Amino acid sequence: MHTIEEAIADLQKGKPIIVSDDENRENEGDFVALSDRITPEVINFMITHGKGLVCTPIEEKLAKKIGLYRMARENTDPLVTAFTISIDHIKTTTGISAYERALTIRALMETGVKEEDFKKPGHVFPIIAKDGGVLTRPGHTEAAVDLAKLSGAFPSGVICEIIKEDGTMARMPHLEALAKKFDLKFITIADLIAYRKKTEMIIS
């Protein structure tokens, strides 16, 4: 395992990291990157080696600003994952290529962004993070936004679940091997919770 500071340093360089949640929760690992440093190359890495759904955690205020309503009228997901309607930027064609998904994600952070800048539905899946981050909900959605804030970046991330070649979800030994293979920093949400409690206590 690496430190939160090491993970932040790589995120700031535009590199993805691996973040694992608790074995009593989803017990899964996700690739995590910063939205404002996302590139087609990182998207392609995620879909090639992660193979899960590429999502974009954002804050509630951004969702409201650009009219991203909840995907489900009644959320029956046990973990209450707050997916919004999916989107593509109006400048995309099909919207599914790594290039066009990166374009759509980066457009979310433009100062004058508005609802009319996006087509709905699309191929980028925003998820609304809970206020309070991982201290409120210990999920990858909140971890991505928290890490973006700690990195001094726009409060949004890009995440993708990591699936093994046999189609099953990657667990700790495989995630550790993957991190070593690609020289990626590897942290847990529990580490991030502990880091936030410690540093925010010092700040306050």
Image (tube, rainbow, N blue to C red):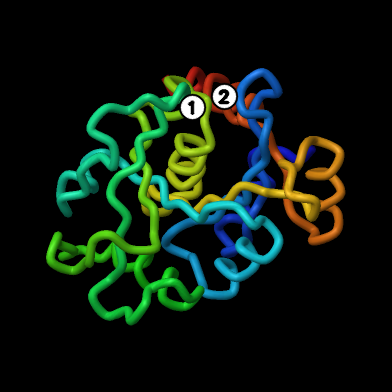
Q: From this view, report whether residue 57 is shown above or below residue 200.
A: below
| Label 1, residues with CA under 10 Å away: few <14, some 14-19, many ≥20 | many
Q: Which residue is mark 1?
A: 134
Residue 11 vertical placement versus 84 (above, below) = below
- In the image, residue 192 lies at what x, y percent? 59, 30
Q: Position of residue 184 (x, y in %)?
A: 74, 55
Residue pictured at 25% horizontal, 65% vertical: 110
Give the percent coordinates (x, y) of residue 2. 76, 40
Taking the image as shown, residue 139 lies to the left or right of residue 185, namely left
At label 2, the amino acid type is: Ile
Residue 180 in the image: x percent, y percent?
85, 53
Q: Residues within 10 Å of mark 2 (few under 14, many from 20)?
A: some
**Pointer 1 with pointer 2, Cβ within 8 A:** yes
The image quarter containing residue 77 is top left
Residue at coordinates 36% horizontally, 50% vertically from top-left?
126
Badge count: 2
- Front position in the image: 194 or 29: 29
- Look at mark 2 in the image and give the residue it sits on: 193
Q: Is residue 56 above or below residue 44?
A: above
Residue at point 28%, 60% (across, down) = 121
Amino acid carrying mark 1 in the image: Val
Q: Secondary structure at mark 1?
A: helix
Q: Residue at x 66, y 56 (%)?
A: 50
3D distance between C-alphas at marks 1 and 2: 6 Å
